[in-house]
Image: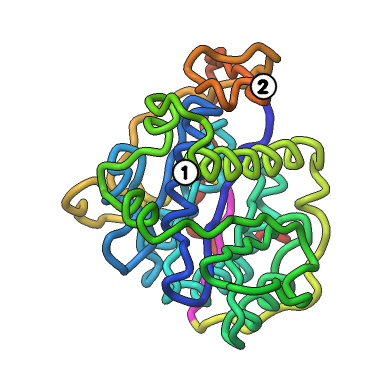
Amino acid sequence: MPRTPVYIICSPRPQVGKTLIARQLSEFLRLQRGDVLAFDVNLKEPSLVDYLPRLTETAEIDDTFGKMALMDQLIINDGLAKVIDLGYPSFDEFFGMIEEIGFIKESARSEVAPVVLFIADSDRVSARGYQTLRATLPPNAIVTVENEFVMRGRLPEAFMHNRVMRIAELPALLKTYIDRLTFSFIEYLRTETDSSTELHQWIRNNYFGFREIERQLMQQGDEIHFLPPRRRIQCPPNAISVRTGTSIARSLAAPPRSGRSMMKQAATTSAPIWRNSFTAPSAVPPVAIKSSTKMTRSPLAMASTCISISSMPYSSA
């Protein structure tokens, strides 16, 4: 089975376009793969769950239960791509957590491929956050996103140690148009007959960038996992460790949250196998047909691997 990608959209700075990029990536993966599961770890409004309520679950990492419930779903190689819209207040807590529990090493064992899309900014906070990622993650797991609306100038060389994806700035009128809660990038491509419009070209170029990340991910194999980090970072007290075993969400007696939340017990499903063919699917809009591939799945009875709390770290599992 191919590795399951986990995309983490993040920045330690607010108002840099994290949710916008998470929206585009989620819709792209739904078109490309047939389905996607997104997690909203964002305190600001409107957030990803407001734009894509059918694809998104809310998540919190301010306590042990929330952290384990999130990891329980990210570490499973079930063929279902995941997207995390990580709010800037949770940046340090999240990456300190994955460093402490050995998420990168465990993802290699579970055939899960984490990819961090870091939206760069020109201030010192962004530069420090980027260095934290470089110290925590393998180089091939980081993609620097140059959002021209944020940078308004040349990307500093300090952010160019990894792959770079550039997103052009949209005029204010078009930005207001796509910020509507009812707007869908896929529906726009399907219904807009004029492929020469600025918005059409902007969406298509971003989708081509996502497609290139997916292509490189398939070519890298296990290399993305086994490159060690440069140094360990300081983690918060009362750190937690996990290992493969029984689902943590089921082992903790906590009441369910209101609304659609990842804390609810999920139904058991069979992990799909993805087969690639080079025939363009009929659902792909005309502008993307040349570079699209058709994804078909064949169900295979395979038990999902879950995780539970244990004092044993991954390195000794």
Question: Residue lying farthest bottom?
Answer: 124
Question: Residue lying farthest left?
Answer: 258
Dot 2: element: helix
Residue at 60%, 42% (x, y): give it.
205
Q: Is residue 164 magenta?
A: no
Q: Which mark, by number, is residue 199?
A: 1
Dot 1: element: helix
The amino acid type, in three-letter code, at marker 1 is Leu
The amino acid type, in three-letter code, at marker 2 is Lys
Task: Decide: few, some or many residues near mark 1? Use Cα within 10 Å; few <14, some 14-19, many ≥20.
Answer: many
Q: Which mark, by number, is residue 290?
A: 2
Q: Position of residue 173 (x, y in %)?
A: 35, 56
Task: Give the magenta part as a residue range.
Answer: 238-244
Residue at 50%, 23% (x, y): give it.
285
Q: Is residue 243 magenta?
A: yes
User: Foreground: 125 or 67?
Assistant: 125
